[in-house]
Amino acid sequence: MYLSEAEEIVAYIVCIAIIIGFVATTYMEIKNTVAEEKQKQKEKKENEAKIKTLIEYFNSKKNLIDSLIKTKKSLEEKETKK
């Protein structure tokens, strides 16, 4: 059983439409995946910057507390010497 010319043309059109649809959906999926990865990288960089800021903050706070303790100790030593 063979197809007529009109049926062959319709079959070719359907095949081409399927291939175009497959290519289009694959392209869209790749585009979305790349966009998601870029967003993840951006969030990662932002989080790293926040963490660095927090580390600097805690180090500064620790240094202040250490200097306060050192000052208190030196004041206590001066008072005990009197």
Image: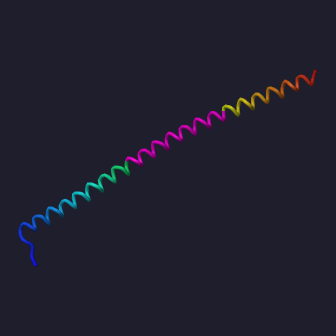
Q: Quadrant of residue 78?
A: top right
So how many labels did they put on this image? 0
The stretch of residues the image draws in magenta is 35-59
Q: Between 75 and 36, which is closer to the camera in this rendering?
A: 36
29 or 47, nearer to the observer? 29
In this rendered view, identify the residue nearer to me: 36 or 80.
36
Q: Would you say residue 14 sits in the magenta stretch?
A: no
Q: Is residue 25 left or right of residue 75?
A: left
Q: How is the image coloured?
A: rainbow
The picture places residue 38, in percent across and down from the top left corner, at 41, 45
From the image, which quarter does the C terminus lie in? top right
Residue at point 48% right, 42% down? 43
Which residue is painted at 53% across and 41% down in the image? 47
- Residue furthest top as drawn: 82
18 on left or right of 48 = left
- 71 horizontally vs 19: left or right: right
Quarter of the image with the N terminus is bottom left
31 to the left or right of 77: left
Quick one: which residue is furthest to the bottom in this view? 1
User: Where does the image place residue 33, in percent across and percent down from the top left?
Assistant: 38, 51
Q: Is residue 44 shown above or below 73?
A: below
Q: Residue at x 79, y 30 (%)?
A: 69
Q: Where in the figure is residue 61, as x and y percent of width and height?
A: 68, 32
Front-most of residues 56 and 41:
41
Report the residue that reaches farthest toward the left.
5
Decide whether the magenta segment is chiefly helix, strand or loop.
helix
